[in-house]
Image (cartoon, rainbow, N blue to C red):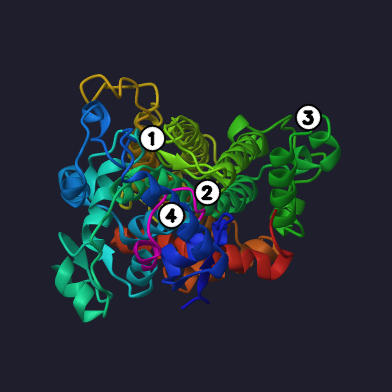
Amino acid sequence: MSNPVMVGVGPVSFEDVIAVARRDAQVVISDEAQDGIQRSRAVVEALADDTVPHYGVSTGFGALATRHIPVEMRTQLQRSLIRSHAAGTGPEVEREVVRALMLLRLSTLATGRTGIRPQTAQAYAAVLSAGITPVVREFGSLGCSGDLAPLAHCALAVTGEGVVRDAAGVERDAGEALRAAGIEPVELREKEGLALINGTDGMLGMLILAIDDLRHLLKVADISAAMSVDGLMGTDNVFKPDLQELRPHPGQAASAANILAMLAGSPIRASHDTADDTRVQDAYSLRCAPQVNGAARDTVEHAARVAQVELASAVDNPVVTLDGRVESNGNFHGAPVAYVLDFLAIVAADVASMAERRTDRFLDKARNHGLPPFLADDPGVDSGLMIAQYTQAAMVSELKRLAVPASVDSIPSSAMQEDHVSMGWSAARKLRRSVDALSRVLTIELFTAARGIRLRAPLQPSPAETAVIAALDAVTRTAPGPDRFLAPDLDGAWRAVTDRSVLAAAESVIGPLR
């Protein structure tokens, strides 16, 4: 388990989100944040008896904001808000996503701009630390006013209602799980219901998780591209730094440097680096790998900058300002996050598309420079990796569909009060599927390249490629031979990719990839 994550007045980091979401780090609130929470709560409580209506404090919500709510009904108002908004349906959302969005909502609460009570913020920290995960459903958020339904399911659990999973993953009644963990359910007061659901935390959490995954997978894409170049008897001359400097995109330079490092010292490469090799240039899918993988990197880093701004934001409506006003605003609109979520789905589709083309070259006798058709042991009797490429192609086709942006759509809601929405949650959900498919497409390229390289024997690959093949062979079998049940081999290779064993193997030889 990771060290506890401190939630303060300032933003949590990407590393904090990953630690809580994926490594079950516990959560504590800083003293400074607790002081700020108490000060903003005092502002809300001072307005509670004001004869002038204040949105979310003494009024209804959305299209019902014109109704003034008497003091004796305000607890019911907040309870009804959460119950009615916890209206998600469909498959259960992944545990890591729910933990990320709860941490990010707590981070906004800790800014002291939302007007909640200290005990409400503490309840969120306690639920996270106890490993309790509210059950959140796939459908329900339009990305404006934030991720209302997903966040409402979390808020409902903190009040002791709804369904959760405990630290062991067992589905339980929320109140029962809270009592077992020694956590007192929260009875929400003025403004608190709104503060718990008016945020972009779901889409932002999924963005940060995707960025973490894509930063890793783009290094894997360089590894698999390098191994394809070598296995297909391609040249590494096109990756030289002076050629990359002619078009100085930072991602392109990093990708080219990674590929060069992977190929350094390859006897396969040396075997055809002669005047007898009459080929003028390799196919685009080989020589343009840094241009595609690099552009993908630069897009991921743009998305990371957007995420960092969002992490530093206090997204709520209304907010308590530094001078003590309670003001409505539109900061909950998910457009900035939704756009980059869609950009990253495009990135995943294109990187996967190029990887599939390299795989196909390995299997085509007319283009693989002397390897057997489909890398089969006895072509005609054996099909080799023919259908592995079909599997890749099916996923690439799916990735292209997932790359259609969600953020260009908008369906008005709340009696036209919320007449333009971001669909950021939908963009995030499809990006998760895109990232998973990309990891599997790259795995099949890597597996194919490893077999192709082994068929070049007695020629040997580079030291870094040798280490990667050894990492794969520790959990699967890349060696050529008669056909066998292929799915388990591909699953083993996928685990070596996703648990980062493949990257660790390459870096053990050539140092950290860029």
Residue under pointer 3: 247
Instruction: Report if residue 278 is visible in the image.
Output: yes
* Marks 3 and 4, how far apart at CA: 56 Å
Does the CB distance between marks 2 and 3 fall below 8 Å? no
In percent of width and height, residue 239 lies at 75, 41
In percent of width and height, residue 305 lies at 61, 42
Residue under pointer 4: 42
Instruction: Please tell me whether mark 1 or mark 4 is closer to you in this view.
Output: 4
Q: Let me know if residue 308 is in the magenta part.
A: no
Q: Hey, what amino acid is under mark 1?
A: Gly
Does the CB distance between marks 3 and 4 fall below 8 Å? no
* Marks 2 and 4, how far apart at CA: 38 Å
* Marks 1 and 2, how far apart at CA: 16 Å
Residue under pointer 1: 424
Q: Residue at x 20, y 64 (%)?
A: 164
Instruction: Report if residue 89 is visible in the image.
Output: no
In percent of width and height, residue 9 lies at 56, 57
